[in-house]
Image: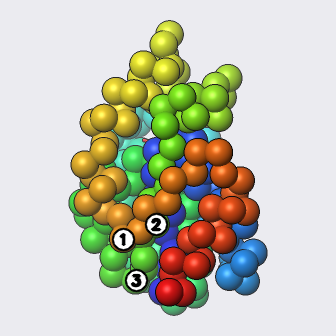
Amino acid sequence: MQIYLIGFMGTGKTSTGKELAKLMKRELLDSDDLIVKQEGMSIPEIFYRSGESGFREIETEVFRKLSEESGEYVVSCGGGAPLRTENVSLMRKNGRIIRLTATANTVYNRVKGDTGRPLLQSDDPLRRIKELMAEREQAYTAAADITVETDKKTPEEVAAQILETLTK
Ligand code: S3P
């Protein structure tokens, strides 16, 4: 059974994933890293060359491969992964889906200045975050088996809370 961490950019999927993987004695995989490795290009480069739709095609290929993986991993998922119901079905096939949340302000503070996220390269990133969050809310809610708020919590605290919920 895989543990898939989903949620908006900056909700702490990677940092929480590291802690959770440690606690569960598993390896951490990251869908973005798998994409970068497979394509031999950075995320901004893929968006530049193939657009968001090209990126989403590759992302689904990666989730298909993960759904066939027999090893048990903690998987940190790119923020847009749950937007395709196909990806969510692939995750459900062999995993539990944990959604991390944070307010728009928290996300903004965590990601500001970062140039690795093409969707947030805007004159008004906070506004863009709010728009995208509102657009995506339903997809995230529909995908999640478990939801954990991350505002004012350390990745260690979030990971411990996830583990507690999983083992209940
Ligand atoms: C995206 C989130 C990013 C990355 C890409 C698109 C999104 O991952 O997959 O830039 O659509 O929310 P993180 O959530 O790890 O930043």
Task: Determine whether label 1 and label 2 are within 8 Å by CB.
Answer: yes
Q: Position of residue 16 (x, y in %)?
A: 65, 60
Question: Which of the colour schemes (rainbow, by chain, secondary structure, one colour) is used?
Answer: rainbow
**Amino acid type of the residue tagged 3 in the rendering:** Asn
How packed mark 1 is, by other alpha carbons closer than 10 Å (few <14, some 14-19, many 20 or more), is: few
Question: From this viewpoint, is residue 18 visible?
Answer: no
- The Cα–Cα distance between marks 1 and 2, rounded to whole angstroms, is 6 Å
Q: How far apart are labels 3 and 2 at the CA level? A: 13 Å
Name above or below for residue 79 compared with residue 124.
Answer: below
The residue singled out by tag 2 in the image is 98
**Which quadrant would residue 117 be assigned to in this image?**
top right
| Residue 62, above or below 117 | below
- Relative horizontal placement of residue 14, taking residue 104 as reference (left or right): right
Residue 165 in sight here: yes
Badge 2 amino acid: Ile
Q: Position of residue 35 (x, y in %)?
A: 54, 55
Residue 56, given in percent of the width and then of the height, sits at 37, 48
| Residue beneath disc 3 | 94
Looking at the rendered structure, the kind of residue marked 1 is Asp
- Tell me what residue is drawn at x 46 percent, y 66 percent: 98
Toward the viewer: 137 or 119? 137
Q: Position of residue 138 (x, y in %)?
A: 25, 49
Residue tagged by mark 1? 145
Q: Compute the Cα span from label 3 to label 1.
A: 13 Å
Taking the spot 48% from the left edge, 32% from the top edge, the residue there is 104
Which residue is farthest top? 123
Q: Can you tell me whether the CB of the residue at mark 3 lies under 8 Å from the nearest atom of ligand 1?
A: no
Q: Nearer the viewer, mark 3 or mark 1?
A: 1
Graded by Cα atoms within 10 Å as few (under 14), some (14 to 19) or many (20 or more), the crowding at tag 3 reads some
